[in-house]
Amino acid sequence: MKIALIGLGMVARTHVAAIRGSDRGLTLAGVLGRRPERAAEFAAQHGARAFTSPREIADDPSVDFVVLATPPNQRADLVQTFVAARKPILMEKPIERDLVAATKIVDLCKSANVPLGIVFQHRARDASVALKLALQKGQLGDICTVDIRVPWWRDQSYYDATGRGTYERDGGGVMISQAIHTLDLAMWLLGPINSIQALMSQTPLHRLEAEDWAGALFEMENGAVGTLMATTAVYPGEAETITIQGTKAKAHLGSGVLNMTYLDGNTTQIGEAAATGGGADPMAFTHEWHQSVIEDFADAIASNRPPMTTGRSALRTHAVIDAMQSANRTGQKTAVSS
């Protein structure tokens, strides 16, 4: 399948490496960026075509699907163009800047029957899949507590980029730009969060409009209670973790490794430690997880099945982040939209 990549920011090279690393017949058809000279340079570096407009991609019958890696405030018009051309869309997180805008995109694709997938690559890790299976088999028992931690670091130079960490471009700070991955993974594993209390703030370590620190207490549909802490202000950055305590065992997921500790004293470990981009270099992680997502999306198109992460399932993270922002403003426990 031939793929058009739109958006040439930090993650673009990861997508190129993922496509190049695949043995599933995937090809980078071309790229599109805001600056034609940059797009031409990038295309030449990777032996691809430099498209000049979204319409050119939409009208090209050889392009099987598009990967959208633009900032979230640039999504709506692009989606409309590709939906009209019936081009399947694989989109980097987040879908848009808030739940209302994200829902419009998901509904538009669904009503036109255009496949939409979201890049939540943490679902593709071996340790994540192993934990999902363990939960489905009931190996942890009833779930009691959940702890989500994203203690990352970003230099101020990261936020000095135009629009980064603003509500107008990104829709917020650490929650929607970084912690959204771990939040999605937690709900993919355990189900929805029903209600939440939150505090979101800027630390003296950064200058940005939105939050670089967020904390929350939450209740889940499965009856568990949980805590969340996410920040880009822990130097030099540590791996994100999810810890789940059940009536039979505890599971700790971090750095691509799953540790299971059973109440009878037995332990198991699955996976291999890997960098996740939690330090000053946001791209310090393997392209293999993106490769799994892209390959899955291509297979989903060919097989006429849902992709690994549908637009509808990705809306759950938007609903929680919106509820956190509301709870932070009001100081009240807030229900999460279903």
Image (cartoon, grey):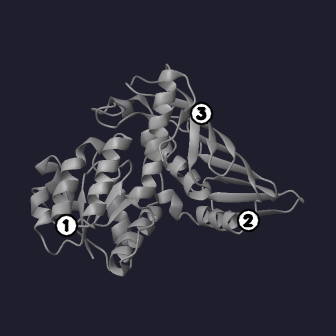
Measuring 9% from the left and 56% from the top, which residue is drawn there?
A: 52
* Residue 211 percent location from the top left of the image: 45, 28
Residue identifier under label 3: 216
Q: Amino acid at mark 1?
A: Ala
Q: Amino acid at mark 2?
A: Gly
Measuring 82% from the left and 58% from the top, which residue is drawn there?
A: 248
User: Is residue 37 toward the left or the right of residue 225 in the image?
Assistant: left
| Mark toward the viewer: 1 or 3 | 3
Q: Quadrant of the N terminus?
A: bottom left
- Dot 1 crowding, Cα within 10 Å, few <14, some 14–19, many 20+: some
Residue 173 in the image: above or below residue 71: above
Q: Quadrant of residue 19?
A: bottom left
Mark 1 secondary-structure assignment? loop
Mark 2 secondary-structure assignment? loop
Measuring 25% from the left and 51% from the top, which residue is drawn there?
A: 8
Asked if the residue at tag 3 contacts the one at tag 1, i.e. Cβ–Cβ closer than 8 Å, the answer is no
Cα distance, mark 2 to mark 1? 48 Å
Residue identifier under label 1: 48
Q: Amino acid at mark 3?
A: Ala
Q: Pick whichever, 237 or 224, lies toward us.
A: 224
Residue identifier under label 2: 138
Cα distance, mark 2 to mark 3? 27 Å
Residue ranking furthest to the right: 264
